[in-house]
Image (spheres, helix red, strand yellow):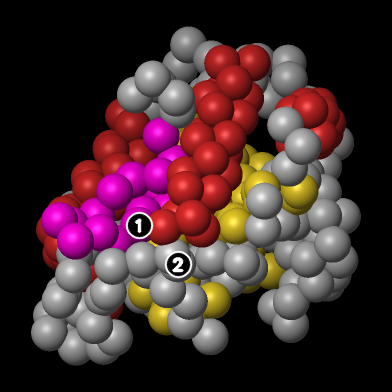
Amino acid sequence: MIEILNPAELARAKESGALVADILHTLKSRSAVGTNLLEIDRWTQDMIREAGAESCYVDYAPSFGRGPFGHYICTGVNDAVLHGLPRDYTLADGDLLTLDLAVSKHGVAADAAISFIVGESKPAESVAMIDATERALSAGIAAAGPGARIGDISYAIGSVLGEAGYPINTEFGGHGIGSTMHQDPHVPNTGRPGRGYKLRPGLLLALEPWVMADTAQLVTDADGWTLRSATGCRTAHSEHTIAITNDGAEILTLPRGN
């Protein structure tokens, strides 16, 4: 299903997007050496409830997971890149943490992810990987606009990731979003320009470049959800929800005031 939002729905999407961004910003500021992933999940639950919003994850049970998910945020550490199920793990100095969050408020969802390094140690390879996903995300957003095609976004993202030397997995990527979290169209993280669905004003997309340092192969953790790099290498993931407008693309998942 591909949804095109009307102006009233788009206004609600902006509210959901700002909430997602604010929660992620708060979680990043609280996440430190000694923080437990289950604490992060509880903080997320509290902030969602205080905002009068709904989690897109807690009851989520897709075919690719051992559902329902049962938690409020995805938490990936080091080699865990997607669908990280919160667990009893205490963050250590230099850990690369990915937080992926989707919430719905007033019937419209928004989705975003950030990766960052915990503590004082900043391994250069991890910094470079995070930077590559952020630059790829910016390139994908710049390629989006009315009349552009999904392939234009995928090509822009893939060009940045490929030039940075990272293998690209196309099993999981960006997606449409609206009244539900995951919708068509699928937005692979590499592709050919001029191909695929033609973008229209009112379309919401969650763009999410993610990489693994030396492999394109994923393995599923014993928890049935967490996807890790097959080689145990580090990973990174960046995501924004954008709205296609008459003038281009608007990022909805920025913290308020940015």
At which x and y percent is residue 161? 23, 58
In this rendered view, identify the residue nearer to me: 69 or 180.
180
Q: Quarter holding the C terminus?
A: top left
Q: Is residue 44 left or right of residue 134?
A: right
Q: Is residue 40 left or right of residue 108?
A: right
Q: Is residue 258 among what the camera can see?
A: yes
The span shown in magenta is: 236-254
At which x and y percent is residue 83? 65, 58
In this rendered view, identify the residue nearer to me: 104 or 133.
104
How many tags in the picture?
2
Q: Is residue 190 above or below residue 166?
A: below
The residue located at (16%, 74%) in the rendering is 148
Which label belongs to residue 65? none
In this rendered view, identify the residue nearer to me: 105 or 215.
105
Q: Nearer the viewer, mark 1 or mark 2?
A: 2
Mark 1 secondary-structure assignment: strand
Q: Is residue 60 above or below residue 45?
A: below
| Amino acid tagged 1 | Ala
The residue located at (51%, 58%) in the rendering is 9
Decide: marks 1, 2 in contact (CB < 8 A)?
yes
Q: Is residue 193 left or right of residue 84?
A: left
| Amino acid tagged 2 | Leu
- What residue did someone put label 2 on? 5
Please tell me whether residue 220 belongs to the stretch shown in magenta: no
- What residue did someone put label 1 on? 243
Dividing the picture into quadrants, the one containing residue 7 is bottom left
At which x and y percent is residue 44? 74, 33
Please tell me whether residue 249 belongs to the stretch shown in magenta: yes
The residue located at (28%, 67%) in the rendering is 201
